[in-house]
Each structure stands twice: as structure tokens, then as C-alpha cells.
Image (cartoon, rainbow, N blue to C red):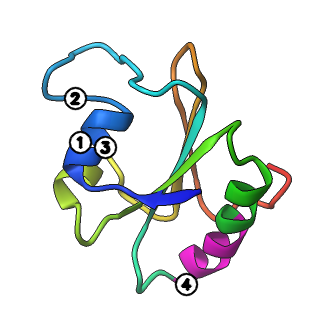
């Protein structure tokens, strides 16, 4: 299921960047976070793909969206400068950021 995150829910479910200096993932399963904005053309291309994948991988991967217009502090905390930016978070290990409208298979 796809969930839209606020700063508060991000800190509860993904990473509390105010409490922890080092990366500490709060989730139980891997996650994908789509940083987007309503006015962004490429974001409108990626959005439906993220929706499909959230259904396909339900229970295996959590899919989240962060509206960078509404959550500017969150976008700033992650250094988001261009969108779409997609953060891939493994259960263990460091997250990886990809920028741009990626093909579905990626």
C-alpha cells in the first residue's frame, strides 16, 4: 500500500534524522520513497509506476511518497534538489538515491 509521509510519519517509519546522526532505518521491510511535486511532469510519469509496484510488492516492500512542496524541511534534510528523486532503502545497510524518471524495471 502506498502512503504519503509527513515529517512526523517519516521519522516514525523511516528515519528520525533529528534524533539519530547515523542512518538508522525504523522499518521492518525494505522501502522505496518517491520525492515528488504536483507540478513536476516526470513525477507524473513515475507516480503510476510506483502505484503499480506498491500493489505488486505489497507486504514485501513499503512504498512511500513525499510531496516536496508540502514537506520542504524533509526534502531539505535529504538534499533533494531535483525531482523525481527515489530513495531505495534496504532492510539493512545504507539507502541509495536515484534521480530522474527511471524505467519501471529499475
Residue sitting at the far right: 105
> Disc 3 or 1, which lies upstream in sequence?
3
Q: Which mark is residue 17?
A: 2
Q: Locate residue 58, reporting x and y percent.
A: 70, 48
> Disc 4 or 1, which lies upstream in sequence?
4
Q: Locate residue 64, reporting x and y percent.
A: 49, 53
Q: CB under 8 Å between callouts 2 and 4?
A: no
Q: Residues within 10 Å of mark 1 (few under 14, many from 20)?
A: few
Instruction: Say which quadrant the N terminus sits in.
Output: bottom right
- The residue segment tinted magenta is 41-49
Horizontal arrangement in the rendering, residue 82 relative to residue 9 (left or right) = right
Name above or below for residue 40 compared with residue 55.
below
In this view, the mark in front (3 or 1): 3
Residue 104 figure quarter? bottom right
Q: Residue at x 23, y 42 (%)?
A: 77
Name above or below for residue 49 compared with residue 88.
below
Residue for badge 3 = 10
Q: Which mark is residue 77?
A: 1
Q: Locate residue 42, reporting x and y percent.
A: 59, 77
Distance from label 2 to label 4 (Cα)? 29 Å
Distance from label 3 to label 4 (Cα)? 24 Å
Dot 3: element: helix
Residues 65 and 81: in front is 65
Q: Residues within 10 Å of mark 2 (few under 14, many from 20)?
A: some
> Disc 2 or 3, which lies upstream in sequence?
3
Q: CB under 8 Å between callouts 2 and 1?
A: yes
Residue for badge 4 = 41
In the rendered image, residue 47 lying in the magenta stretch gets the answer yes
Dot 2: element: loop
> Disc 2 or 4, which lies upstream in sequence?
2
Horizontal arrangement in the rendering, residue 58 relative to residue 7 (left or right) = right
Amino acid at each position: 500500500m502506498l502512503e504519503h509521509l509527513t515529517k512526523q510519519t517519516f521519522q516514525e517509519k523511516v528515519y528520525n534524522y533529528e534524533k539519530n546522526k547515523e542512518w538508522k532505518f525504523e522499518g521492518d521491510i525494505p522501502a522505496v520513497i518517491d520525492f515528488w511535486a504536483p507540478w513536476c511532469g516526470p513525477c507524473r510519469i513515475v507516480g503510476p509506476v510506483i502505484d503499480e509496484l506498491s500493489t505488486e510488492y505489497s507486504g514485501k516492500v513499503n512504498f512511500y511518497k513525499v510531496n516536496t512542496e508540502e514537506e520542504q524541511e524533509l526534502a531539505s534534510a535529504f538534499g533533494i534538489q531535483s525531482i523525481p528523486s527515489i530513495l531505495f532503502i534496504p532492510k539493512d545497510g545504507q539507502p541509495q538515491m536515484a534521480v530522474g524518471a527511471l524505467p519501471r524495471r529499475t
